[in-house]
Image (tube, rainbow, N blue to C red):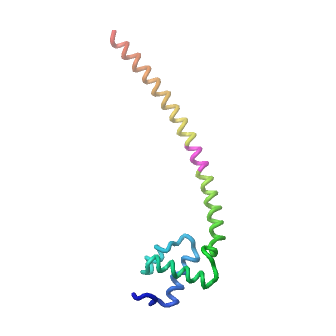
Amino acid sequence: MRRGSRSPEFKADAVAPYLSDPSHTFEGIGKDLGVSRETLRNWVRAERARRGERGTTSTKTKDVSVREATQQELEAEIAALRAELKTVRKENQKLATERDILRKATKFFATEMNW
């Protein structure tokens, strides 16, 4: 398709999902609509310039809440990993003790059989 042959309505519909949800990507939306990632990125830049926005100003409030949720999720994951590490260390100690007992028993029975 020739350059600039998309209607303004099509461009607005293509840009809207990206601006409304930070989880969308240029590549994903472009693939769905049959336009290149770079073309969609240019349309987003033009729309932001038309609105007088700079960068990702429109999604900053969403980014903060996403970061907070991510921080809470990370803290929960760290707590779970610490608990798992504690369990694994106990199991490791138990297995090391069992191994040492078996080594001693093997040496004992090996010397007893060689009389």
Q: Position of residue 33 (x, y in %)?
A: 45, 81
Q: Residue at x 63, y 83 (%)?
A: 51
Q: Nearer the viewer, residue 102 or 68?
A: 68
State the image coordinates of residue 108 (x, y, percent, origin top left): 41, 16
Horizontal placement of 2 versus 24: left or right? Answer: left
Q: Residue at x 52, y 89 (%)?
A: 9
Q: Which residues are magenta?
A: 78-84
Tell whether 41 sits left or right of 111.
right
| Relative to 1, 63 lies left or right | right
Main SS of the magenta part reads helix
79 drawn magenta: yes
The residue sitting at 61% across, 57% down in the picture is 73
| Residue 46 pos. (x, y %) | 56, 83
Residue 47 lies in the magenta-colored region: no
**In this view of the protein, which residue sits in the foreground, 112 or 26?**
26
Give the answer, above or below, for where 73 lies relative to 88. below
User: Residue at left 60%, top 85%?
Assistant: 50
Name the quadrant of the N terminus: bottom left
Q: Quadrant of the C terminus?
A: top left
The image quadrant of residue 112 is top left
Q: Is residue 87 above or below residue 67?
A: above
In the rendered view, would you say 78 is above or below 44?
A: above
Q: Is residue 73 left or right of residue 114?
A: right
Question: Which residue is outermost to the top?
Answer: 115
